Image (tube, rainbow, N blue to C red):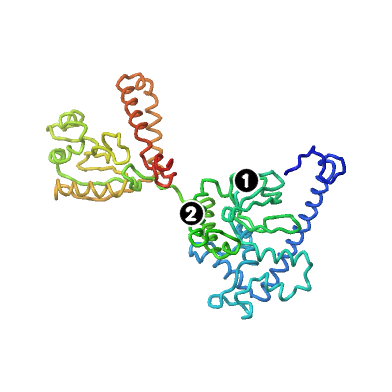
Amino acid sequence: MKIGRNDPCHCGSGKKYKKCCLNNGIASQEFSWSKMHKSRNELVDIMMKFAMTKYGKESIFEAWDEFSCWDDDAPEFDPEAHQNQIFMPWFFYDWTPDPENTTVMDDKYHDIQIGRALLDCKMNQLSSLQIDYIEKCLESPFSFFEIIKCIKGEGYQLKDLFTFEEYNVVEKMGSKSTQEGDILFGKLVTIEAVTTLEACSPFAIPPSMKRLIQELRNHINIAYPTISNDILKKYHFDFLDLYHDFHDSILNPKPPRICNTDGDDIIPQKLFYEVDSFDEVFEKLHCLDIISTREELLEEAIFDSNGELKELEFTWYKKGNKKHKSWDNTILGHIELKDKKIIVSVNSNERAQKIKKIISKSLGKKAVYKNSVIEDLTQMFDRKVNSFKQSLNNQDDLIDNQEVQEKIKEMMRDHWSNWVNEQIPALGGKTPQQAAK
């Protein structure tokens, strides 16, 4: 049972715990942590010199390739890289040179960790604490740990998400920038009843990504219902692969995919056609505007002195929308007839190909395709923003309009009646109803 700070000390001195063994325990832990920290720093230099001498200068680059899971897109090894706080412990205590793919100078070091080889060759030159530390690092596997409790500037209570064991960990710096619920990838070492993170990911994994770790655990559980440290070592490449996925998604996220309501990548563009006369063009294409009648469109047209159609704009619609079931129609593009040209504006390659087929089938050789111009997304958004700002000037009149109010109410009713059945990317493509189950 946990002793409170003001409870009588368990040693029988009659003093309060905070005035007796609590302080002694803290002092003892601080002393052990300081010894471990100093010993670890000394070992880094010793092991690096040993690795370069016995394994060769190429070993660190070959190990980096393996650590990166031989990813062709991975960056080259950088001595200053933030990933070294994970890679260097892995290099010293987990990497075993493959006889087929490495150039280790001495064949006897193939399939042997650097830390193990150092113990075999130079044990008499190491302190007992250093020997104990290396042995514990060799035994300890990498794993994913959830922060159950975080004491800023002091440490954590961590739970291994595979073995479910819990650890009280001393970590002064890392605990300042993390919080309960965060997940760490690393290796724990316990010496003299003090547990520290020998290796730790340079970022905290958010709780929202815990599902991917659980999927890996479920996969391992199929073969091993009870997961031990030895089992974790068997899956260390699976752990590395998952760690790199987290690294890329958190520190090097891909730009969001911007799509239209049909799910096509947004690539705004204009298609240009040359024609001799707009009269037949209008007769063949005005049906693309399913909202307005032929007569309504002509009311907005400009005619020349001979009564021939000179300029006209209209919208290309389709009925309904596969993403938004409550929509009556979807805008696919805008068509402008001007200066003996048909100018079609669309926002995707798919819609561009579709309108090309429509124009070719409807007008044949009477419409000559000239070229397409891809628009800059930034400029397109700037125009949209400016247009929106202009529309705000009239928003009061719109809001007061009774028809507008009724339409907004109708749209809101449709949305709230259907939202539980819409697929949400943040839920892995599931609907809220499916995710709730």
Q: Residues within 10 Å of mark 1 (few under 14, many from 20)?
A: some
Q: Check disc 2 and report its element: helix, strand or loop.
A: helix
Q: Is residue 316 visible?
A: no
Return the mark for residue 372: none
Q: Nearer the viewer, residue 419 or 72?
A: 419
Q: Nearer the viewer, residue 253 or 162?
A: 162
Residue at image coords 72%, 47%: 154
Q: CA distance from mark 1 to mark 2?
A: 20 Å
Q: Check disc 1 and report its element: helix, strand or loop.
A: strand
Looking at the image, the residue that sits furthest to the bottom is: 107
Q: Nearer the viewer, residue 341 or 234?
A: 234
The image quadrant of residue 346 is top left
Q: Where does residue 28 sit, x and y in percent of width and height?
A: 81, 52
Report which residue position mark 1 lands on.
Answer: 148
Q: Quadrant of the N terminus?
A: top right
Q: Is residue 120 visible?
A: yes
Instruction: Give the residue type at disc 2.
Output: Glu
Instruction: Give the residue type at disc 1.
Output: Ile
The image quadrant of residue 137 is bottom right
Q: Residues within 10 Å of mark 2 (few under 14, many from 20)?
A: few
Q: Where does residue 222 sit, x and y in percent of width and height?
A: 48, 59
Report which residue position mark 2 lands on.
Answer: 215
Above or below for 222 versus 432:
below
Q: Is residue 191 left or right of residue 403?
A: right
Q: Quadrant of the C terminus?
A: top left
Question: Nearer the N terminus, badge 1 or badge 2?
Answer: 1
Residue at image coords 22%, 43%: 342
Q: Where does residue 413 sit, x and y in percent of width and height?
A: 34, 28
Q: Is residue 371 left or right of residue 242?
A: left
Above or below for 388 versus 370:
above
Residue at image coords 54%, 54%: 247
Q: Nearer the viewer, residue 50 or 415?
A: 415
